[in-house]
Image (spheres, rainbow, N blue to C red):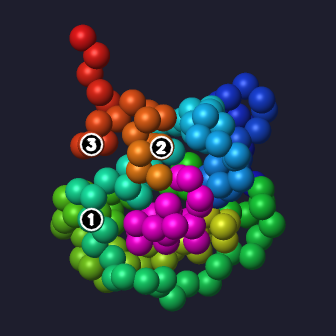
Amino acid sequence: MVDRQSTTGDGFTPLYSEIFRMINNAKDKPKKLEILQKYDTPSLRMVLKAAFDPSIIFLLPAGTPPYEPNGAPEGTEHTLLSQEAKRLYHFIKGGNDNLVQFKREQMFVQMLEGLHSTEATLLIDVKEKRLNKVYKGLTENLVKEAFNWNDSFTKIETK
């Protein structure tokens, strides 16, 4: 069983796939911003930076890797992308360049198989840099505005 206790004070933290679905279904930009800011965590920022920052290059083959989607019901026997985000550096250029490519691909498949199926699909969409095509309104500009990021995906310094 995975712990999905909230950091927002409401007792429950949704999966990233659920957060992005909420953004997709939100009627306007202010509501989309509100959702992103409500569920803001360092790991969510890592995932979004990986999805939108063009300087982040995944060292994995294009497309969906061969993996067995985790069939466990939501909230049971799977890991969370919010917990696995800290391991994404293994899959990007400059993160863990000493890792043998076969091992990198094997680790990615293992990560996918441990995640809830919706989060595994989301992670593949992050790798393929297509979140904005899957979730309406989840754009590079929305993410930059929500987190006060500049074009380098770092916090804008205020004087």
- Identify the residue at horizontal 77%, vertical 70% (top origin): 72
Q: Residues within 10 Å of mark 3 (few under 14, many from 20)?
A: few
Check if residue 131 falls in the magenta segment.
yes
Q: Secondary structure at mark 2?
A: helix
| Marks 2 and 1, how far apart at CA | 21 Å
Q: Position of residue 20 (x, y in %)?
A: 62, 53
Label 1–label 3 contact, CB within 8 A: no
Region of the chain picked out in magenta, as a range: 121-138
Query: In the displayed image of the protein, which residue is found farthest to the front?
Result: 28
Q: Secondary structure at mark 1?
A: loop
Q: Is residue 129 left or right of residue 100?
A: right
Magenta span: chief secondary structure:
helix
Mark linked to residue 151: 3
- Identify the residue at horizontal 24%, vertical 76% (top origin): 100
Mark linked to residue 142: 2
Q: Secondary structure at mark 3?
A: loop
Residue 15 appearing in the image: no
Q: Position of residue 82 (x, y in %)?
A: 56, 49
Label 2–label 3 contact, CB within 8 A: no
Check if residue 143 falls in the magenta segment.
no
Q: Mark 1 or mark 3: which comes first in sequence?
A: 1
Callout 2 amino acid: Leu
- Identify the residue at horizontal 78%, vertical 32% (top origin): 11
| Marks 1 and 3, how far apart at CA | 16 Å
- Which residue lies under the disc numbered 1? 57
Callout 1 amino acid: Ile
Label 2–label 1 contact, CB within 8 A: no
- Identify the residue at horizontal 76%, vertical 38% (top origin): 12
